Amino acid sequence: MANLNRRQLLTAGALGAAAVPLAAATAQAGTRSAATTGNVTYPSRPVTPGADRAAASGWAVLAGRKVGVITNPTGILTNLRTIVDEMHEAGSVDIRGVFGPEHGFRGTAQAGDSEGTHTDPRTGITVYDAYGAGTDKMASMFRAAGVDTVVFDIQDAGARFYTYIWTMYTAMKAAVQTGARFVVLDRPNPIGGTARGPMMTTPWTSGVGAKEIVQAHGMTVGELARFFDGEFLEAEVGARLTELQVVEVSGWRRDMPYAATGLPWVMPSPNMPTPDTALVYPGTGMFEGTNLSEGRGTTRPFELVGAPYVDYRWAERLAGRELPGVGFREAYFNPTFSKHQGKVCGGVQVHITDPRTFDPMRVGVEMLVAAKAIYSDFAWRYDSYDPKRPYWIDKLTGSTRLRDQISAGASADEVVGAWRDELAEFDRRRQQYLIYRGPAA
């Protein structure tokens, strides 16, 4: 979700609570047959998000509480209705306010924008604009709404620079300030449970990477909430949450592609149209930090990448690398907005052939290394409004290292190898906070 309009976020970043499974809710969202991807067959039992489990219990987890809900169009039940509409119509949840992240509660805003504070015409509930809000402002909104319990239900995309997890972290800090209970209605990580990529470093934290986690964190938002609470809150705000409850997903395992869950895909943001977009995003999202189009303004953002100066050589070189789980098609496109609007761009379309072996970080690095090597017009995006940290790629990748290495002609092996130790250490630290198991744990 990082884009050219996030200036206001760049200064943003710099519990003894375990995840509590909801008391067994027997009503499930129908049955599904076993799903097979490649040679792997996944369990036939339904994958049921936390929201559906909470709804099946009559929202017992929120009974008697004054509730504030942080959600967006992905906060739905398997009947495709939003949790806010369902709670409101059921009359069993006292919703004191809704808090809209980037793109807004109903999803009407483009990247880098929000819907503003307003009254929701369907429910009459006040919707507070939480996008870009700091801890104090978020806490003041919680107090104004009179909430004692904050509910988070948003489908994440699995990448550090996707801003919803930082809205959640800010809300957690605000909940510490106000003494509010925090409830996460958990959902699957659409790109699986494997952690990948470089670590964020403190000098480069921002609204697209507020704390020190790796680029593809490999956790659900419920697991991240546990990690944030255990690793960051006390040091940053002086205390952990008074209570953190994660209403778990049932039936999900860490190596399960989103297609195998049987769940509907609702676009978490306007430029995240499919689960394949989420799979490529941690890698090709790095092209936001270059002068190539990352495919915004096309129907396949982050899968189509290119620029007016790119030709067939890029696709040929990438195909020759024979990377697992992916193919590269020579492609031409004309963005309707964002970079190179109205200009024909040459480039590639990234085709995932096997999500089990596809590594978005490796693919993104290979693409950057090849583009830099072939085209003299390749350049890193330079933001003059931030003269001390002008390169957006550094904020996306967590330090100057990746840019420095590629600019100096390093190979993809050298770039990927540079983060091996910090990734292993992060993976070790996160283990105690994981809820879901499986081959990728």
Image (cartoon, helix red, strand yellow):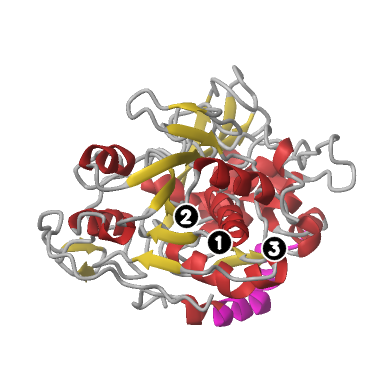
* Any part of residue 318 in sight: no
Outermost residue, top direction?
342
| Residue 81 against residue 228 in the figure, above or below | above
Give how far across and how far down residue 397 sits, in percent. 69, 56
State the SS at label 2: loop
Q: What is the three-letter code of the residue carrying label 2?
A: Asp
Q: What is the three-letter code of the residue carrying label 1?
A: Gly
Q: Residue at x 48, y 36 (%)?
A: 271
Q: What is the three-letter code of the residue carrying label 3?
A: Met
Q: Is residue 56 magenta?
A: no
Give how far across and how far down residue 122 sits, in percent. 32, 26
Q: Is residue 415 magenta?
A: yes
State the SS at label 3: loop
Magenta stretch in the rendered image: 409-429
Say which quarter of the image contains residue 236: bottom right
Q: Residue at x 26, y 64 (%)?
A: 38
Decide if residue 121 is on the left or right side of residue 207. Answer: left
Magenta-drawn stretch, dominant element (helix, strand or loop): helix
Outermost residue, right direction?
388
Which numbered disc flags the more N-terminal residue, 2 or 3? Answer: 2
| Residue 299 against residue 80 in the figure, above or below | above
Q: Which residue is mark 2?
A: 148
Q: Residues at badges 1 and 2 in contact (C-beta under 8 Å)?
A: yes
Which numbered disc flags the more N-terminal residue, 1 or 2? Answer: 2
Q: Within 10 angstroms of label 3, few (less than 14), some, or many (20 or more) residues?
A: many
Say which quarter of the image contains residue 324: bottom left
- Disc marking residue 200: 3
Q: Residue at x 11, y 60 (%)?
A: 33
Decide if residue 436 is on the left or right side of residue 342. Answer: left
- Disc marking residue 179: 1
* Any part of residue 66 in sight: yes
Give how far across and how far down residue 433 sits, in percent. 48, 76
